[in-house]
Structure formats: structure tokens, C-alpha cells
Amino acid sequence: MAKAAPTQPAPLAQTAPEDVARTVDPSPELAQLLQTMARDLATVGHEIDQLKINQEQMARDNAKAAEQLKASQEQTARVIAKAEQSLRSKISGPPPRLTATPTRKPVPTL
């Protein structure tokens, strides 16, 4: 006995929003509201684009600051290493000679 293929429902008719807009005659108030919404959406889209641009600039600025910080830390490490080396060479060198100063004998007073 052969199985029958399951029947699939017929696709529903899809109506594009443009088709609906053409079939409905909007009132003047609704038309004004739609125009306002369209302008607002365009403004929001522009602001989103501006935010993306600003975010990309901030990411570049942060990367540059991180590079500068790393370079500064490396330079500081080099200066410290040089100072430590200089200090070690001064410490490990021969100790300074101490010269004995003759002590004075008190002069008798008359």
C-alpha cells in the first residue's frame, strides 16, 4: 500500500503594505500622521548612521590611546631598567676611600 503525500495547505495570499495603502484612502489626519512618522523614521535612520560613525571613531581613538599607553609603559620600563643598572654599577664599584682627618689637640689656655 503506497503512502499518500501529506497535503500542504495552500499558501495564503500575501498583501504588500503598499497594496494596502493604495486600497485605503487615508483621512487627512492619518496622511499627516504617516508623513510625520516617515520623517521621524528618516531622522532616526540618520541618527543611527551618525552613531555608527561616532562609535567607529571612538574605537579608533581607543586603539590609538592603547598604543600610546603601551609605548609609554615600555619607555618607562626602559628608563627604570637604565636607572637600576646605573645604581647597581655605583653600588658594586669600589667603596669611596675614607681619609682620616687628624684630631686636634686642645691648646692650653693661660
Image (spheres, grey):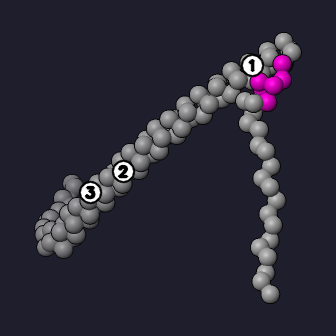
**Secondary structure beneath disc 3?**
helix
Residue at mark 3 to residue at mark 2: CA–CA distance = 18 Å
Residue type for callout 1: Thr
**Residue at x-position 84% and y-position 12%:** 28
Percent coordinates x, y for residue 36 in the rendering: 75, 19
- Is 16 situated above or below 105? above
Rendered location of residue 10, percent (x, y): 80, 55
Report which residue position mark 3 lands on.
79
Residue bearing the label numbered 2: 67
Q: Quadrant of residue 97?
A: bottom left
Q: Is residue 73 above or below residue 64?
A: below
Q: Outermost residue, top direction? A: 28
Percent x, y for residue 66?
Answer: 41, 50
For the residue pair 90 and 99, the one nearer the viewer reads as 90
- Amino acid residing under circle 3: Val
Instruction: Kindly indicate whether the residue at mark 1 contacts the one at mark 3 (C-beta within 8 angstroms).
Output: no
* Amino acid at the residue labelled 2: Glu
Q: CA distance from mark 1 to mark 2?
A: 46 Å
Name the one closer to the observer, 17 or 44.
Answer: 17
Q: Secondary structure at mark 2?
A: helix
Q: Nearer the viewer, mark 3 or mark 2?
A: 2
Query: In the rendered image, which quarter contains the C terminus?
Result: bottom left
* Residue shown at 62% from the left, 31% from the top: 45
Quadrant location of residue 32? top right
Magenta residue span? 20-25
Q: Residue at x 36, y 50 (%)?
A: 67
Element type at marker 1?
Answer: helix
Q: Circle 1 sits on which residue? A: 36
Is tag 3's residue or tag 2's residue first in the polypeptide sequence?
Answer: 2
Q: Nearer the viewer, residue 75 or 53?
A: 53
Q: Residue at x 36, y 54 (%)?
A: 70
